[in-house]
Image (cartoon, rainbow, N blue to C red):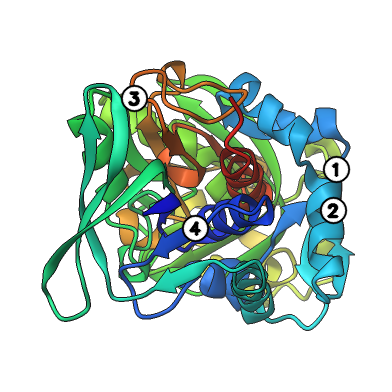
Amino acid sequence: MYDVIVIGAGAAGLMAAGTAAMSGRSVLLIEKMEKAGRKIRITGKGRCNLTNARPAEEFLEKVRVNNEFFSVAFAEFNNRATIKFFERLGVKLEIERGERVFPKSGKAWDIANALVEFCEDKGVKIVYKTQVTEITTIGDKVTGVKYLNARGFERREEASHVIVATGGVSYPSTGSTGDGYDFAYSLGHNIEPVRPSLTPLVTSHPQKEYLNGLLLKNVGVKLYIDNELRQEEFGEMGFSERGIEGAVALRVSRDAVDAIIDEKRVKLVVDLKPALDEEVLLARIEREIAEMQPSEFFSELLRKLVPKQLVVPLAKEVDFHSKTYVSKLSDAEKMRLVKILKGMVFPIVDYAPFQYAIVTAGGVCCDEVNRYTMESLKIKGLYFAGEVLDIDANTGGYNMQIAFSTGRLAGQLKK
């Protein structure tokens, strides 16, 4: 019999297991994949943005859902504590633009391996290729788990505490397939509807085929839902076969996805020249035209203003053929060009599925979890940590910190 069984060897599970073992408890960590930290190893494009160094108040503002619930776990183990934790494990870190924290090596593996070593050093027993099928209880108290071992045989293990850290359903190839929701629901917990968050957005823009691979830097993006301004962002935005992505698109995707599910009209309005107001931009266009030869084409003017891939889409938006002489551009067409550069509209009709989403929105209802311990308010000895909970945040290291903070608090097994 173990004191604690942790289900899921991701960021939250590894932190919870190692923390529980620090106090001398016997801990079994069960992972259904062949190695621990599969999702950690691919986050941040393989670099792992493990937290964000912003002050506490600013940090919590980036937690979009249930930040008040999360604030307790964050106060116990905040971003500064996370930085110190990994540095003590021998991982050198650096703070980059936007206060994002990465391993100095640029390798996400260093974070995953440090967490595994932390658990092993504290005496945690980790078993791989093992699928938990049920959390067992007597009355309203946890008694252990049933599982299928690597050879496919059903086994049972007893424990007085079980921590569910199975993740959400984003990046299912890493093992996040929603098991934790099934466990929680079977034990009487309500699950807030799950949907992708921080996910690419699919546009119906008629010239979208020209934009695949385009990366725009320093653009302003406004999210409109039913023609009402809902959110404004500034930064990078990109286009791929998955849809519109990049930091600004991902940050607005949370509200956009919910609106699409509710069958509301969604659009992104992109300011390609946020540093210039309309008057200054018009003056620049007129200056560029004055310096060009009358025989030069409209497309050559556009090349002076935007990346090459935007030339054809912009020409079509202005309704002015790219091979028309620039000298033929009327004042009305110049102003139309200004308006489009300051507000190019991308209707949003869908969103990318869970396999492309960075995190899962929704999950175990936080009203049914003790925020001071992470223990279920319905089943004694049952704890939750990480993405399985209905907590999610903006991109920038915040979601990883949610995993570390809630995992640390759950692993303390406070009464």
Please name the residue that numbered disc 4 is placed on. Answer: 27
Q: CA distance from mark 2 to mark 1?
A: 6 Å
- N-terminal of the two: label 3 or label 4? 4
Q: Residue furthest left?
A: 153
Residues 283 and 130: in front is 130
Given contact means CB atoms under 8 Å apart, are the residues at marks 2 and 3 in contact? no
* Residue mark closest to the camera, 3 vs 4: 4
Graded by Cα atoms within 10 Å as few (under 14), some (14 to 19) or many (20 or more), the crowding at tag 4 reads: many
Q: What kind of element bears circle 4?
A: strand
> For the residue marked with disc 4, what is the amino acid?
Val
Please name the residue that numbered disc 1 is placed on. Answer: 54
Q: CA distance from mark 4 to mark 1?
A: 33 Å
> For the residue marked with disc 3, what is the amino acid?
Ile
Graded by Cα atoms within 10 Å as few (under 14), some (14 to 19) or many (20 or more), the crowding at tag 1 reads: some
> For the residue marked with disc 1, what is the amino acid?
Arg
Q: Position of residue 72 (x, y in %)?
A: 69, 25
Given contact means CB atoms under 8 Å apart, are the residues at marks 2 and 1 in contact? yes
Q: What kind of element bears circle 2?
A: helix
Given contact means CB atoms under 8 Å apart, are the residues at marks 1 and 3 in contact? no
Q: What kind of element bears circle 3?
A: loop
For residue 90, what is the image quadrant? Answer: bottom right
Q: Is residue 324 visible?
A: no
- N-terminal of the two: label 2 or label 4? 4
Please name the residue that numbered disc 2 is placed on. Answer: 99
* Residue mark closest to the camera, 4 vs 1: 4
- N-terminal of the two: label 4 or label 1? 4
Given contact means CB atoms under 8 Å apart, are the residues at marks 4 and 1 in contact? no
Query: Relative to 273, is 387 on the left or the right?
Result: left
Q: CA distance from mark 2 to mark 4?
A: 35 Å
